[in-house]
Amino acid sequence: MDEKEVLKIEISKPIAERFRRWVAERYGMRRGALSKAVEDLIAKAVNESGVGGVEDIIGIGLLSDYSWRGEDLCEALRGRNVSDRR
């Protein structure tokens, strides 16, 4: 088993609530689901999987004429027919 490290973070309550619902839908209600979801998202963001990552997210914004106004970015991009490369 990999060595684990505790990260203490603070996020806004509305985002935390939405994230918990998202995790429950995708990972289920079992113990450790929240940690697994966060670990998967961080691994993807730092490009551990070799696909996607922060650079792809930034690239979408730079290549787009889209102007973000604070709405949920994933939903806004889906509405503009940007593919999800999962």
Image: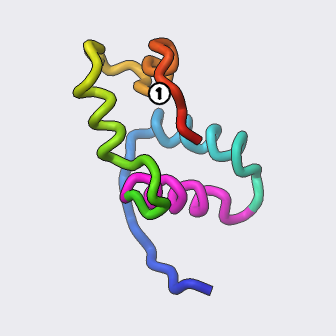
> How many numbered discs, if any?
1
Q: Which amino acid does label 1 sit on?
A: Cys
Task: Using residue 40 as the reference point, say whether residue 23 is left or right of it.
Answer: right
Image height check: is 8 above or below 17?
below
- Decide: is 4 above or below 46: below
Residue 14 pos. (x, y %): 47, 33
The residue under the point 55% across, 41% down is 19
Tell me if residue 41 is in the magenta stretch: yes
Position of the C terminus, as image quadrant, is top right
Magenta region, residue range: 31-46
The answer to whether residue 34 is left or right of residue 66 is: right
In this picture, is 8 found above or below 54? Answer: below
Q: Where is residue 36 in the image (x, y as percent from the top left)?
A: 60, 61
Residue at horizontal 35%, vertical 40%? Answer: 56
On whether residue 79 falls in the magenta region, the answer is no
Looking at the rendered structure, the secondary structure element under dot 1 is helix
Above or below residue 31? Residue 75 is above
Q: Nearer the viewer, residue 86 or 14?
A: 86
Residue 76: x %, y % from top left: 44, 17
Residue at mark 1 = 74
Give neighbour class at mark 1: few <14, some 14-19, many 20+ (Cα, 10 Å). few
Residue that extends furthest to the left in the rendered view of this protein: 62
Q: In x, y percent, where is residue 2?
A: 56, 84
Q: Image check: 63 left or right of 8?
A: left
Task: Give the image quarter of residue 80.
Answer: top left
Residue at (30%, 45%) from the top-left corner? 55
Q: Quadrant of the N terminus?
A: bottom right
Which residue lies at the image location 38% right of the left edge and 46% below the top edge? 11
Q: Main secondary structure of the magenta part?
A: helix
